[in-house]
Amino acid sequence: MSHILVVIPLGLIVVITALDLALPRSVHLGPLLVVAPALTASFAGPGYTAAIGALALAADVVGGLGQGVLGRPEHHVEMLALFAVSAVVVVFRVVHERHRAVLHQVRSVSEVAQRVLLRPLPRTVGPLRIASVYLAAAAEARIGGDLYAAARADGVTRLLIGDVRGKGLSAISDAAASLCAFREASHGPTTLPELMTRMENSIHQNLTEHAVTDTDAQECFVTAAVAEIPDAEPTVRVITCGHPPPLLLHGNRVLTLEPDQVAPPLGLELLAASEPRPATFPFEPGDVLLLYTDGVIEARDRAGAFFDLPARLGERAGEDVGTLLERLCEHLFQHVEGRLDDDTAVIAIERLPAPGP
């Protein structure tokens, strides 16, 4: 693209020089040539910028010769000023290129870190079809405070969604500890209450280690919801730890899977006081289960109205989970006019009909 845009400053140099030679000697347009290198620096590298600056200086010499003012002191000052401005613009462009290279490297590292931390969910697991989306509130962010994961063992699929409440490296560390504990415990013969207890212990230990050197770690905790879906039963078992309850799209109806017992968030040493009990809900073929973080339901428009997720979900009845999530994200961005204030993660799970004989 810069190769095409460089025609613009070249055209400016030609036009300004031609007008300078055509106009009377009392009108001198040479100072306008400084626009060419300044404009080039906005889209091209230091090499292109220096070349355009040199051409502008040469054009100023041609204009001075044509008007007979090349030997005058004021024209010498004009040429010196043009050279100085071009040199400063080139220097700033060099600094910009270095910062750009560093930023690109940081983005690459953060993207790799996110892929390690948040592994892509499989599209199909057993009798389930899964779609997921992660939206960072910061435009340049790659890693945020939301997390999700899926694990499969012994004819059972488990899905986790969570939200780390904290900031800095301690929040990312808590997210990693939560995901590691979930993946490790889900592959063995572990019940849902035991799974949540292991996650609580792992997160609390991680917080304790970081609290010595990071005061922000003392303010961290994790809200989470875990869904366990057996292949052989049209049910889903849910435990929520201070997290928004899942939604179930059954036909045209949207049901809130609100457990009788909501456990406290993880990392506060409150889970051990009362072991959480999973709540069981019907999850039949054709139903869609939606796990989400509060970045969705707490999204506000300019008038302060919250995003109505159940209503929007009901409008998407009959769509496959991939299209459903795509449409929900479109509605969400329309509601907030393209500005998210919080990270957002959503998982949609559809139970497929049993295969025929």
Image: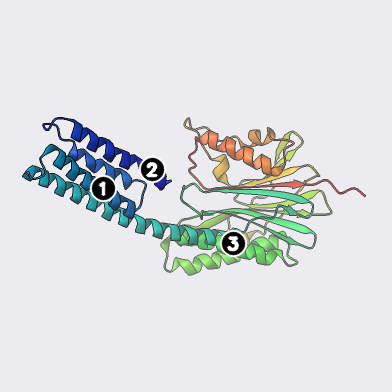
Q: Earlier in the sequence, mark 2 or mark 1?
A: 2
Quarter of the rendering containing residue 231: bottom right
Q: Residues within 10 Å of mark 2 (few under 14, many from 20)?
A: few
Q: How far apart in space, not on screen, are marks 2 and 1 (Cα)? A: 16 Å
Q: Residues within 10 Å of mark 1 (few under 14, many from 20)?
A: some
Q: Is residue 198 above or below residue 96?
A: below
Residue with the most extreme right position: 357
Which circle, 2 or 3, is nearer the viewer?
A: 2
Quarter of the rendering containing residue 273: bottom right
Residue 13 lies, in percent from the top left, at: 27, 40
Residue 109 lies, in percent from the top left, at: 49, 62
Q: Which residue is mark 2?
A: 5
Q: Earlier in the sequence, mark 1 or mark 3?
A: 1
Residue 135 lies, in percent from the top left, at: 55, 47
Task: State whether residue 279 appears in this view.
Answer: no
Q: Secondary structure at mark 2?
A: helix
**Type of the residue with mark 3:** Ser
